[in-house]
Amino acid sequence: MDTPNLLASLFFFFLLSLFSGHQQQVVEGSSGLGPKMMFVFGDSYADTGNNGKALASSWKLPYGITFPGKPAGRFSDGRVLTDYLAGYLRIKTPIPYRWRKQLGGRVKYGINFAYGGTGVFDTLVPEPNMSTQIDFLQQLLNDSVYSKRALKTSVALVSLAGNDYSNYLATNGSAAGFPAFIGSVVNQLKVNLKRIHNTGVRKIAVSALQPLGCLPRSTALLAFEQCNGTENSLVDLHNQLLVQSVNELNKETNSSSFIVLDLYNAFWNVFNQKEARPVSPPTFENPLEQMLCWIHPTEEGWRAVYSTPVVQNSLKQLW
């Protein structure tokens, strides 16, 4: 090819690549083994920066002082469950939904839709509940940000840490009506899990409820020496119904797509500090006081929970 024709061809391909760069990029799947993306739904146990700065305490000290060194929207002094799960899967922590346009190059690793303070139903926190969070993912599919093929290489983390129950009490829900309300929460959660699966997400890990009666807000009145048994009995009911729902979903879909991440027993293992762990965890002189900051685990608390065999064994099912 003579020089003028070569230059013309190169110029053509330059224009083509320049033009293509302005087209919407669809995230496609990969044929490699293992999950390539993670989508996150839920609340403050998984949120990495979705709540507005004017609304959330997660943008104020002491949050973020361990990681990344300043408040950055996580409800912890450092990393949260989302970060540890992403690390386990060897993918980057998915960006918060609110930063998807500013950090568009990161959407290939998934998106975190979780908002602190929210539940499966509306709460006193004016942020999107879990149903709306799933709507956000569906809209991204409709807008061709992701393809169905891409979601086949993804996993989802679904966190429910009890905001629906706090809201129930705050709005004068009765003690007698609590068991029925727990049933309605788990039923809605089951609907949400099925919706996520129907988008094409391959594996979904949903967190069991942690022992709420052992959080510092409950144990402070007892000098951080014992848990509130009444609260934990209600947690037991929630977790029993959750396991039943997950088993039903796996049967309905003829798969093992749905996994319960047993935070309840993981927290208990840390509180008791009796079980040997495959990952070296921190130790606490008084775990009921030190591993949590009022209701949120510290980074050391999350690392200790993540390190327990019960969590490690659950995570193996995501591959």
Image: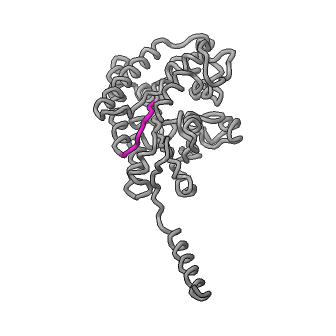
Q: Nearer the viewer, residue 111 or 315?
A: 315
Give the farthest residue toward the front.
1
Seen at 40% across and 51% down, the residue is 149
Visible residue check, residue 124: no
Seen at 46% across and 30% down, the residue is 317
How many numbered discs, if any?
A: 0
Where does residue 277 sit, x and y in percent of width and height? 61, 20
Q: Nearer the viewer, residue 20 or 191?
A: 20
Where does residue 69 sit, x and y in percent of width and height? 71, 41
Q: Which residues are magenta?
A: 199-206
Q: Nearer the viewer, residue 42 or 121?
A: 42
Q: Is residue 15 left or right of residue 188?
A: right
Where does residue 285 sit, x and y in percent of width and height? 69, 15
Seen at 42% across and 44% down, the residue is 133
Q: Is residue 235 left or right of residue 69?
A: left
Q: Is residue 61 above or below residue 7?
A: above
Q: Is residue 45 above or below residue 218?
A: below
Is-magenta flag for residue 88? Answer: no
Q: How is the image coloured?
A: one colour
Q: Is residue 172 above or below residue 155?
A: above
Q: Is residue 306 above or below residue 57?
A: above
Visible residue check, residue 154: yes
Where does residue 85 sit, x and y in percent of width and height? 55, 35
Looking at the rendering, in which quadrant would you find the N terminus?
bottom right
